[in-house]
Image (tube, grey):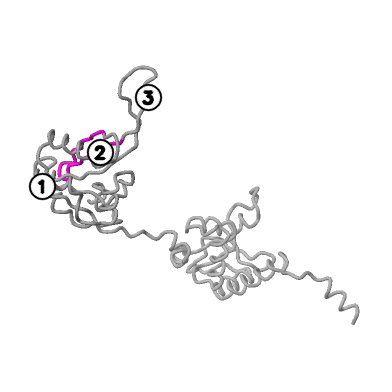
Amino acid sequence: MFKNKDVKENLPQYVTHDEREKALTTCIKLSQQLEFPEEIEALRNRQPLKKRSRILSLTPFLDEKEVLRVGGRLKHADLEFLSKHPVILSKNNVLLPLLLDDAHKKTLHGGPQLMTIYLRGRYWLIDAGNTIKKYVRNCFPCAKQKAKTVTQLMGDLPEIRVKPSRAFLTTGVDFAGPVNVRMSPGRGTKTFKAYICIFICMVTKAIHIECVSNMTMEAFMAAFRRFTSRRGFVKEMWSDHGTNFIASSKEILETWRLGKSTIPVELAALLDTEGTKWKFIPPGSPNHGDYGKRG
């Protein structure tokens, strides 16, 4: 009893490589016996294979463990025995799904070609190409990686974008900056912070740029007067609710940021005189005012 106990304790706690190879060889022999019973029986009796045999062109033989392998003329080649004489398996082999699973994991979810190259280092697969492709298609992680992203269908262009009109008849406005500007050239001249007021035509994409000294209401009104005197009457003005006007006056900040549909009295009087309508995009929706994102 003590001797048997010592022997059992000396045994490894895991399956060794030799044990796995023996088990795999046994499984291969049993699966080949189900696939090629006539060929194996003929080779055991040293008889020629029948002409209707599927593996007749492979000149098969049984090795010392009675595993059916490919013959060929590479007997004296400087290659490993498994490469010169791979094991013969077909797509109907009951062991093939397990071998495909092992090859797919060891190739790090490789594709059909990589799996075929990996398996051909040890096995000769007969008509198993479609079986390998089907296995890869049914792999859930591979399907997720190769999934095509759905593209959102673009909406209809707004009315102001598709109806021809004079340039700047419908205009969007926004601020950019700050930028540093100088009032006069020469060394030692101080630079001042300024902003860029951008007017863009919603139909022709034409751009008009004005430099403003600050983001106050007075500065914008002066830029707007210069713009209309140069480009003419504006029917509609589009702007956001003030996310780009944080440094502007409290009137603009309070009015546009809270999403009110009214504008300051001074600017309203000016626009009313010019006959211009001011329209705001929805609050928190900059894509409604971005020309490039509207179609």
Q: Residue at x 48, y 64 (%)?
A: 141
When the figure is inspected, residue 263 is found, relative to residue 58, above or below; the finding is: above
Percent from the top left, x then y, of residue 275? Answer: 8, 46
Q: Nearer the viewer, mark 2 or mark 1?
A: 1
Q: Which amino acid type is marked by label 2?
A: Cys
Rendering quarter of residue 208: top left
Left or right of 80 in this view: 277:
left
Q: Which residue is mark 3?
A: 190
Which residue is situated farthest in the right direction here? 2
**Which sits in the foreground, 127 or 135?**
135
Percent from the top left, x then y, of residue 246? Answer: 33, 47
Q: Residue at x 86, y 78 (%)?
A: 5
**Which circle's residue, 2 or 1, is located before the other in the chain?**
2
Q: Which amino acid type is marked by label 3?
A: Lys
Q: Tag 1: Cα neighbours inside 10 Å, few (<14), some, or many (≥20)?
A: few
Query: Which range of residues does the magenta coloring cover?
Result: 195-211
Q: Which mark is residue 272?
A: 1
| Residue 63 part of the magenta-drawn span | no
When the figure is inspected, residue 282 is found, relative to residue 250, above or below; the finding is: below
Q: Which amino acid type is marked by label 1?
A: Asp
Distance from disc 2 to disc 3, alpha carbons, whole Å, reads 22 Å
| Residue 196 part of the magenta-drawn span | yes
Distance from disc 3 to disc 1, alpha carbons, whole Å, reads 39 Å
Rendering quarter of residue 224: top left
Give the main secondary structure, helix, strand or loop, of the magenta stretch: strand
Percent from the top left, x then y, of residue 239? Answer: 23, 48
Answer whether labels 2 and 3 touch (C-beta < 8 Å): no
Q: Which mark is residue 197?
A: 2
